[in-house]
Amino acid sequence: MLLFGHLFVTLGIFFGLAIFIPRLKTVINPRYLAIGAILPDLIDKPIGEVIFASTFGNGRIVGHTLLFSLLLFLAGLYLYDKRRDIRALSLSAGSFLHIFEDRMGADPYTFFWPLFGWSFPRDSRDFIGVEHLVTMLIKSFHLEFLLAHVTEIRAILTGVLIGVIMFLYWSKKRFKKKGSSKIVREEL
């Protein structure tokens, strides 16, 4: 799944759950949840596909492990206990949802790292650093590439749709607040 998929699907899950569990809004900060939703890719893609592409050859390494999310969660619990700071808990929730959305459970060697060894599985593609990322960007505009990645495109479109719905919801809520405050001022 790509950027918009991770961001908006994660935020959509959070706001959907917050409808049924209102207290969730006091435990999770949506801004840090959004950062956590892309954090595994922010860590792993540059390291595994660009900087150390010849070593790892994979964009799903340490940030895509259960251990990474658990360590973030433990740091979040500690900071919440000491300072009532929910930012690290929010990051860990976003990170966990990211690896859930990527279906990392289907790749136990990465998901349960380092239980099955210290190395990560190599991807079947040839990784050549920045050139790889540029090639992927150029290919993303070709119909053959898009048809080969229909599942990812559906996830992106779902994420964008959730983002549009959230934007419309927030806009409606904000418009009502401005309209009601204007009426109150006119009455005075």
Image (cartoon, rainbow, N blue to C red):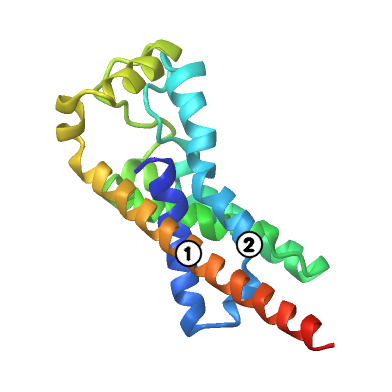
In this rendering, position of residue 139 left or right of residue 134:
left
Q: Picture coordinates of residue 156 (x, y %)?
A: 33, 46
Q: Is residue 27 above or below residue 33?
A: below
Q: Position of residue 6 (x, y in %)?
A: 42, 49
Q: Nearer the viewer, residue 62 or 183?
A: 183
Q: Is residue 106 left or right of residue 148?
A: right
Please state the total of marks drawn on the protein image: 2
Q: Which residue is mark 1?
A: 168
Query: Which residue is drawn at the image coordinates 37% and 55% (left, top)?
Result: 100
Q: Quadrant of the C terminus?
A: bottom right
**Residue 154 at x, y = what percent?**
24, 48
Residue lying at the far right of the rendered structure: 188
Q: Work out whether residue 58 or residue 140 is closer to the camera in this orientation and state it.
A: 140
The secondary structure type at the circle numbered 1 is: helix
Res 105 seen here: yes
Q: In the image, what residue type sits under mark 1?
A: Leu
What residue is shown with label 2?
89
Please tell me which residue is depicted at 38% across the width and 40% down the height of the picture.
2
- Asked if 130 appears above or below 141 in the picture, the reply is above
Quarter of image, res 130: top left
Across and down, in percent, residue 140 comes to 29, 26
Answer whether labels 1 and 2 touch (C-beta < 8 Å). Answer: no
- The quadrant the N terminus occupies is top left
Residue sitting at x 20%, y 32%: 146
Camera sees residue 112: no
Q: Residue 9 sits in which quadrant?
A: bottom left
Numbered label attached to residue 78: none
Q: Nearer the viewer, residue 79 or 151?
A: 151
